[in-house]
Amino acid sequence: MKLNESLGMSKQRLGSSGLYIMLMSIHGLVRGRNMELGRDADTGGQVKYVVELAKELSHLPQVARVDLVTRQIIDPELDPDYAASLEPLGEKAFLVRLPCGPRDYVRKEELWPYLDNFADNVMQYIVNIGIRPSVIHTHYADAGYVGTRVAACTDIPLIHTGHSLGREKLRRLLDIGLSKAEIEKEYNISQRIEAEERILEVADLVIASTQQESTQQYSIYDNFHADRMKVIAPGVDLKNFHPPCEDYRAPHIKQDIERFLHNPNKPIVLALSRPDQRKNIHTLVKAFAKNKKLRELANLLILAGNRDDISDFDQGPRKVLTRLLMEIDRYDLYGSVSIPKHHKIEDVPFIYQYVVKTGGVFVNPALTEPFGITLIEAGATGLPIVATNDGGPKDIIEHCNNGCQIDPLDSREMGKVLLDLLTDRKQWQKFSQNGSKNVREFYTWKNHARIYIQSIEAIIQKRTNKKSNTISSPVIKNDKIDRLIVCDIDNTLIGDRDGLKAILDQIESNDNVGFGVATGRGIESTLKILSEWKVPVPDYLITAVGSEIHYGGNLSEDLDWIKQSSYGWNALKIRQLLKNYPGIKQQAKANQRKHKISFNVLDEEEFDYAHLVSLLRKSSLHANVIYSHGAYLDILPIRSSKGLALRYLASKLQISPERILVAGDSGNDAEMLTGNTLGVVVANYSEEIAALRGQPSIYFAEKSNAWGVKEGIQFYKFFDDYKIA
Ligand code: GLC
Ligand code: MG
């Protein structure tokens, strides 16, 4: 199906004011059928969650369309399904795949440099589709980060689900003895945590799966807002997960399971998870091995993803699987542990039923478990569960009374609990019945969707500046121009008169090129300095570090931008809080704007940037703090920056970021240099943006000031008569 066809249908429904929900989940392998859960570390419960959520929401009468936006992967090693830009998930639900960095598979920790590009691609998609989503609902920190950018430019409410949290992960990894440096290298954890702080600062609603996640895991963030949290447990697909009935059939992998076992009729202890260190399967193996009675009584079945050749795996899963096989060998568990190489997701409901028939149990020994979808699926099938004493299992066992909690580090206790449960058949029966009955009551997607829709409708209503769901025609479209050049002023456009003249002449002689500036200065000071340097008044002026936009004959200010970008802004309180902050001093009155508070940094040693950011966050003062030249500190509304203002302007002009050349030299330019814009950094740049080197579409010029801009124009062949893709 083509995008246009899918749109025609949706537009009809949206005409009758239905909700258009955009879900976003970027990493892993996402498709509607035959999900390859467990194939790699990024394709697990979250993928299943988002696909099921998309389908369920699309069944509701209030919903006109659901798009689940993910990353497009064009990789010869993978199924071509992941390359399709559109995959219908149902009558009103679609999977939309957009490019994000390289074409082939990239693990989530390495996607960070491409997320600004992905955000631009999402915004372009919204422009193409011509309909404003009613909400954007992001999943995990990567999509959340993208959501903060898209929400800021479009003023669409942002809903977020973390699935797992960086601060929690950091704590856990430190606990097991990894150093901060190791964790950073492997997981890019500080970038993830910073993104999560941002998301919590901006999101209208954060959905957690359990009470513990909401109150204990999120509360360690500076931006924790209890009033924006909502616990909505995920659901289980009840059509597939139910106790064995007349149409019971053995799982396809029955023989595969049994070829490992001396006596396949014994009750089975089943563990099913990705081969991830956190899942702690080796402790279960130890628990089983060391409990003689348990070994005699039961078999252990481990389904840890699919494998052909373990040596082909990444280090993480390779280590986990190697260790498992070594433990099986060490304790000589041959004949009583089954560890099949393959299983298909469609077979899982039958595997659970098969284990029920042996009178077995399901065990999840993970070190921590934010939710654990498998627990409710196994429970719904009638398997008693034994699970880690943590977030998800706690809630599930409390609601369903269908199993026991264990300490994941205590293998001896684990063995004992399993043995007791398998021997006490009365208890087994009770847990089995409770599970299949109570999961049906507490964990249905229908329930989830009902509470979900109530919550988002409340949010949409709360937004006073509620907008219509069609994108209004661009107010300031100028048919003459098809591309734009936007320069920072100080140290970029100005500083070298000859270079300046050279590029001004070039711009002047190309009618199809619009000209803009983006500066830290206020509008008055901008006009003054431009006139001193004999620069004609630009078509578009982004001033006060993006907090103001002016254009048109009389240079009037765009008031819509002010309204949407000033979200959560409280200048008075910020001024008060930072009045005597060490190492900084407020700049002159003339530099203070309604939506920009500026300081000079007097003493770089004394001034603690990270502390200041955290202080603002803990005081619930939402702000974007931008440090430039080691000398200036600008505090802006959280939805304000040169980059965001530029994108807002670009969408009004209907010019996509790929057709905008931006040039700058310092920290306050960073956000307009990343993403799909054609970035140029002049040679006299200041240290804080050195890290942008190597990022996609950012050119570091060899020349300084305007000569550097000119070099960038040549590099991109920007004025040439070519059609930009
Ligand atoms: C300009 C502004 C100043 C700001 C600086 C960095 O110099 O006048 O207020 O702090 O840019 O953005
Ligand atoms: Mg500058």
Image (spheres, grey):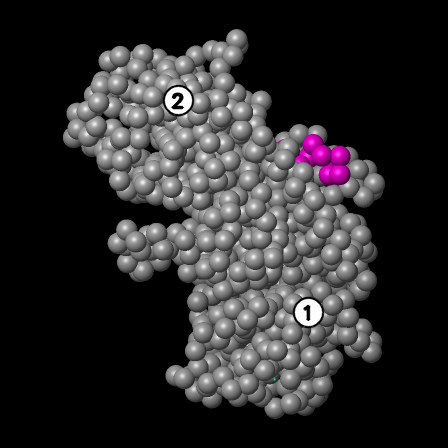
Query: What residue sits 42% from the left and 56% below the top?
Result: 167
Q: Quadrant of ligand 1?
A: bottom right
Q: Is residue 60 covered in magenta?
A: yes
- Which residue is rendered at x = 44% and y = 40% of the image? 394
Q: Which residue is mark 2?
A: 428
User: Under tag 1, what secondary structure?
Assistant: loop
Which residue: 48% across, 49% down?
213
Q: Which residue is mark 1?
A: 566
Q: Amino acid at mark 2?
A: Trp
| Residue 250 in view in this figure | yes
Above or below 355: residue 19: below
Q: Which residues are magenta?
A: 55-64
Which residue is at a point 60% across and 60% down the rendered structure image?
202
Q: Position of residue 279 (x, y in %)?
A: 35, 39
Crowd around label 1: few <14 · some 14–19 · many ≥20 (10 Å): many
Question: Residue 598: percent from the left, percent from the top?
Answer: 58, 82
Question: Image check: 536 left or right of 148?
Answer: right
Q: Hey, which residue is sitting farthest front in the picture? A: 426
Q: Is residue 183 above or below residue 446?
A: below
Evaluate whether residue 720 shows in this view: no
